[in-house]
Image (cartoon, rainbow, N blue to C red):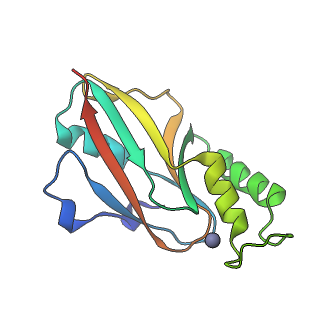
Amino acid sequence: MIYSDLTRNNSLKHCAVMPEFTVKTSSREQMIDVTALVRDAVKESGVSDGIAFCFVPHTTAAITINENADPDVTRDILYKLHKEIPQQDDYRHAEGNSDAHLKASLFGASEQILIEQGQLILGRWQGIYFCEFDGPRHRRLIVRVLSIA
Ligand code: ZN
């Protein structure tokens, strides 16, 4: 873990309201806490009241919100997903990663977090996780900070 594996794309560095990040995953299935990145994007945007819209433009990766206090929670999530949705099964998709497509659809490609007084409204134990299901790869994470004030 993991912040060393997360880099902001230089090409979009100047664009404060729509930062894009590269997430480098190191195993086939992995959950990476990106909460600090999203917080930074909100801070840089200067938006006080709004929504942080996080989007993963991939079909075998996803984003979700869950506990970031005990690392065993993400371990258990991945353990159970791996157990219930095995990589090998009676799938037809020739690419051999149907399990990853299934897991990505279960979690979804986006999350929206409200912003109040410049702060993400997250529960005390909540973190934002980028979810890799067919890594390791370099992935994109788009964060758009929208003002609703
Ligand atoms: Zn596929």
User: As displayed, is residue 132 above or below residue 27?
Assistant: above
Residue extending furthest right?
90
Question: Which residue in the rendered view is the most extreme toward the left?
Answer: 14
Residue 132, visible in the rendered structure: yes
User: Where, quadrant-wise, is the C terminus in this rendering?
Assistant: top left
Question: In the image, is residue 65 above or below residue 141?
Answer: above
Q: Is residue 75 above or below residue 93?
A: above
Relative side of 106 to 114, left or right: right
Residue at position x 18%, y 59% from top? 13
Figure quadrant, ligand 1: bottom right
Residue 67: tell me if it is visible.
no
Q: Image point 45% across, 61% down: which residue?
A: 2
The x and y percentages for residue 51 are: 33, 31
Q: Residue at x 66, y 64 (%)?
A: 100
At 33% from the left and 59% from the top, the residue drawn is 21
- Picture quadrant of residue 91: bottom right
44 horizontally vs 98: left or right? left
